[in-house]
Amino acid sequence: MAAEADPAAVATVGPGPLVRRWASLDPQLRTAALGRARQAIGFAAGTGRAAWPHVDEVTERAIVDAAEADRGTAWPRLLLSDYARYWRDGVRTAYEQPAGELRRRTATAALAAALHGQPYLDEAADGLLQLCEQSTWCWAAHERFAAEAGRVVPDVDRPYLDLGAAETVAVLAWADLILGTTLDERTPGLRQRIRRETRTRIIEPFLGSRDWHWLGLDGHLHNWNPWIHGHLLAAALFLVDDADIRTQVVDLVVDGLDRYLGSLPADGGCDEGYAYWWNGPARLAEALDLLDRVLGGRLDPWRWPPLPQLARYPHRMALGGGWYVNVGDGPARPSAAQAWQVLHRWGRATGDRQVIDFAASHRVPGEPAVTVAAGLGRAVRGLTDSQWLTQSPTAPPLPATTWLPDLQLLVSRERAGSTAGLTVAVKGGHNDENHNHNDVGSYLVALDGCPVLVDLGQPTYTAISFTDRRYEQWVTRSEWHNLPVVGGHGQAAGRDFRASTVAVDTATDTATDTAVDADALRLDLAGAYPPEAGCRSWRRQVRLDRRRATVTVTERWRVDDPADLRLHHVVAGEPLTHTTGRLAVRALTGGIAVLAWDPLLGAGRLERQPVDDPLLRDVWGPAVHRLVLTLPAQRTGSVTVTVSGGTE
């Protein structure tokens, strides 16, 4: 998602390339193409296994086995008491998890039914009707209408259009596409019920209001925009039979996607990090691809800025072994079950070999080419993509140096194309980014692809996660990033708290992508701290020296009151030896990293922090540590910390 923009400035911005291209097409051609959308997808619904000629046996078996395993269990129960927990004790997951499981199980059954018919057709129909019979598709954390009325029971006459509603209608739309008339034959009336619920819960609210915050009409664009608009597009194409209404919906979808496209930085960055990239830029690419297919290639959006750069973001952020550079709420080790076919198609469309190769590096022999975990629409398109299904594994591209000037993010690795050795990532930016943590100037260091000095990433979301109490969560605060404490103060939240005098030195032979010597990022962190910290300047340089195989972090400060100056380092793995000026850590994957500093600072204090949050524990284990170095009580001073591979 892009950072918040000035609403006054946004109002003066004209239409972008998508709206201009859409407007240039003959309206009758557009309307006719939208009416033939089902045929344009290239799938004959209800024809059984013959409709999937390229699906390999491993992928087919995984889908059917999952559907068969589901049939032996009870359907998820969606309870009011779980929904109400959001208001009672701040817990979101009690309801969102079974709601997500209901969507997943229904989607799995729909794919199995499309491949093999009964008994999975009945299973799919059961799931589809259960989705239709839910009182609400909206997640409690987003339900504004009920909250405004002081209720925990949603008003069925006033549906709220959020991510949960969009995800639900997407299952209905793609299931209707692939099952088609087989549903009419087996369960007459179900498709009419699906259309009724889609009309009242999705289409009418969307057409009837422009107050939905995710439209971005105030200039604040985030990943809800392409995520919801993409699902609305599928709903309009596959579930709206009235041509005029279908066209109205798609016209508004085009307008919304164009606004999001125009908000994205030219460098192809994503301020929410890699994991959210899949539900921001990737959702945009999927929607554009669907529109382009429906229009018979007349849209051809793939050269529009910044789409070619956006496709490169995942491999630029890859550390290796499933670890990624993470910022904000991004997890450092997200699920590997992503829709790699989406990235593969994107790379083919832009002609980018590195993008294609990175997607292809996730084709593991003996494992399914496509899973339902990433969504039914993504699975359907993957299962009809012969080039993806027949793709052989390749080695992932791992660039030596990536510098994203708009995001102010540098990623530098010791050896291009290899996870071996050190990789460092350091960011500037400001403290009002989407899914923000107060982390201006923070950095992470990985050894052999595994983070050792870390950004903790996303905690489990609760009722305070997106409120003015957000920074009560310890992992969002600067004190739990690799940053200084100045005068006893951490960084402050807000767009005005940002890095300044940002300068980068990179040394890469662009002709060969060969890294030479060193990369460094220099920035002043003083502007990220509140005035009461009395921070006049805090100049940090983070430098990867490839010749010496070290990361060197140099701090130079000038402050009003030096009474409480500290450097914090968040460490994952097992501390081995901790002595004056030195800490050795066994990384989570087994290598040993050594932190070293001026012995005059002493040994510092090593604090153990239990990790109780299940999302964080799955990534980092039961505990992390924080090394606290107390700096000299001087108004001006400097220190250096180095990180290298080593021995215990």
Image: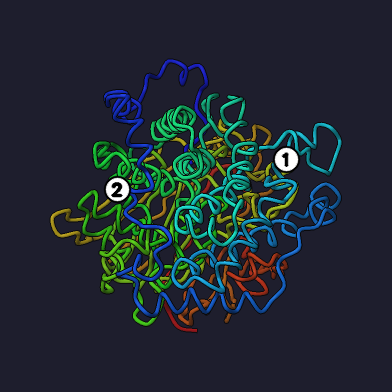
Identify the residue at horizontal 33%, vertical 33% (top origin). Answer: 32
- Residue at 49% in and 29% down: 245
Report the Cα–Cα distance between label 1 and label 2. Answer: 47 Å
Q: Pick the residue in front: 400 or 65.
A: 65
Whether residue 439 appears in this view of the structure is yes
Tag 2: residue type?
Answer: Asp
Q: Look at label 1 and name its amino acid.
A: Glu
Between 31 and 358, the residue placed more toward the observer is 31
Q: Which of pointers 1 and 2 indicates the residue nearer the eye?
A: 1
Q: Is residue 400 above or below residue 142?
A: below
Q: Position of residue 509 (x, y in %)?
A: 17, 55
| Spot occupied by residue 463 in the image (x, y as percentages of width and height) | 75, 47
Residue 639 visible, this orientation? no
The one of 216 and 519 positioned closer to us in this rendering: 216
User: Can you say whether 300 is above or below 322 in the image?
Assistant: above
Tell me whether circle 1 and circle 2 mark residues in contact (CB < 8 Å): no
Q: Is 102 situated left or right of 110 in this image?
A: right
Q: Nearer the viewer, residue 531 or 17?
A: 17
| SS label for mark 2 | strand
* First of labels 1, 2 by sequence position: 1
Q: How many marks?
A: 2
41 in relation to 373, above or below: above
**Residue 442 place in picture, x, y as percent:** 51, 51
- Note whether 505 is above or below 29 in the view shown: below
Colour treatment of the image? rainbow
On the image, numbered disc 1 is attached to which residue?
Answer: 143
Mark 1 neighbour density, 10 Å: few (under 14) some (14–19) many (20 or more):
many
Name which quarter of the figure residue 493 lies in.
Answer: top right
The numbered dot on residue 508 is: none
Q: Secondary structure at mark 1?
A: loop
Q: Residue at x 33, y 31 (%)?
A: 30
Label at residue 505: 2
